[in-house]
Image (cartoon, grey):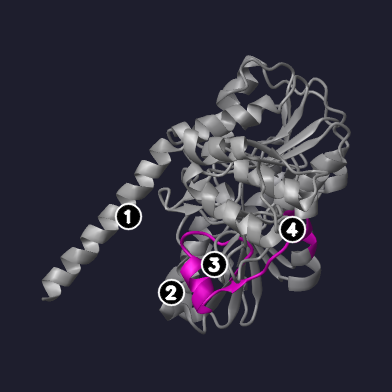
Amino acid sequence: MTWRQIYNSKLVTAEEAIKAIRPDDKVVVGFGCGEPFAIEQAMIDNYQDFKNVQIINMLTLGDSPWVRPEMQGHFVLNCLFASQSNRKAISTGACEFTTSHFYEIPEIIKSYICPRISIVMVSPPDEHGYVSFGTTVDYTKGTTDYCEVVIAQVNKYMPRTFGNSIKHVRDFTYFVEADAPLPEVKSVEITDTEMKIGEYCASLIKDGDCLQLGIGGIPNAVCAQLWDKKNLGIHSELVGDGVVDLLEAGVINNKYKQTHRGRTVLGAAFGSGKLNRYINNNPAVELHPIDYVNNPIEIAKNDNMVSINSCLQVDLLGQVVSDTVGLNQYSAVGGQVDFVRGATMSRGGRSIIAMPSTAKKGLISRIVPLITEGSAVTTPRNDVNYVVTEYGIAQLKGKSLKDRARELIRVSHPKFRHHLIVEFRKRFNEEPFDRNEFKELIFEDNVEALQETRAHIRENVKSHMHINNNDK
């Protein structure tokens, strides 16, 4: 049989394909820009036909219909990365959550979760009968090697990518043709705070460095500050639109990488049509499974590896919290530790944790004496090198506990420094700074912050008085 005959013999509707799912099955599905929404929708529309089916997924850019009340007894979601649409369900127990470093997830799925069915999204087959996993090779492609049933949504909008991202039509059980634009992660306007953080991060990047950037405001701000650099490389679990202009201009050309020289290496692409058009049929971009891309040993093979990741909270010892807020799961560990360790192992490598100094519109500090009770440490203090905020760079590697705390206080928001200094005294039984630096940190550069704090206090007092007067 020709590949076209094989393909046509496996071509079915979504409703026909999902009949392969049995009671108590475990079904792993693609995530991010490669989530097979058309097939998932058929499962949701016919949810009463299913019993105790576990859905294994990572970050979703859409809804999480599996956690709706009516799905109980039919579907249960076991997610590997909390998303906006399922965080509440995780906290209430309506959704399972499995934690793991990203590079271990393919093995976790294969050897511990053991799904029977894989549902993915791919491009249409080429003239040789090969489809591409496009934007999302990550853990997705690996599941099609061992699952008993492999169902693929064929979508003309899925870009065709190079690297370890193709598979022949003979290796699938069913194909469902359903064309729909991919979900997009569009770039948003970079804030002044993010731009300042990006400036500090860029100051730690040298010509010829190999970068891991991620997605979001801070990575985009870093990209905006790299135009004076030369011969940069990319080896990253994922990227967004921010890298496209740098790639097209040759600022990122991967010239000095030790592995995949001349090529950008990714596990997934999380951007808009701009990024998808760039990676489509581009031989200078390779997508590979995440157990390769995120393996610290593979990362470290590139000299001068620089990882840039964000977080939610850092304590005065340098412990980093990135995926939990107290007892609530906010996201996941992802590839942060993979790349922090890979960059540290790299010859000339550096790891950066970058974050705004405050959260909740400036009401709380991200640099704290103690991490919030119930929070899980994402990156241990021994792994942390640089911490960057809009107030500067704290270098922690090789520093004593006292010096780590001093470094972090210096880059904290001015209006929280006095509290952190008080906590330093309690912990270490000494003053953290001499009189001149204390004045500089607390008073001389802090007039605006003190005025802002006083304004917050006045507003709180007014609100309290207004409530009490209404009660009377």
Q: Mark 4 falls on what kind of element?
A: loop
Q: State which tag comes first along the sequence, 2 or 1.
A: 2
Q: Name which residue lies at 55% across and 52% down.
A: 366
Q: Which region of the structure is painted magenta?
A: 78-107
Q: Name which residue lies at 72% across and 42% down.
A: 130
Instruction: Find disc 2 in the rendering and name its residue.
Output: 68
Q: CA distance from mark 2 to mark 4?
A: 28 Å
Q: CA distance from mark 4 to mark 1?
A: 42 Å
Residue 16 is labelled as 3
Give the position of the C terminus as an image quadrant: bottom left
Q: State which tag comes first along the sequence, 2 or 4.
A: 2
Q: Position of residue 337 (x, y in %)?
A: 75, 52
Foreground tag (4 vs 1): 1
Residue 108 is labelled as none
Q: Mark 1 falls on what kind of element?
A: helix
Q: Position of residue 358 (x, y in %)?
A: 49, 48
Residue type, numbered disc 4: His
Q: State which tag comes first along the sequence, 4 or 1.
A: 4
Residue 457 is labelled as 1
Residue 101 is labelled as 4
Seen from the viewer's position, the closer of residues 297 and 17 is 297
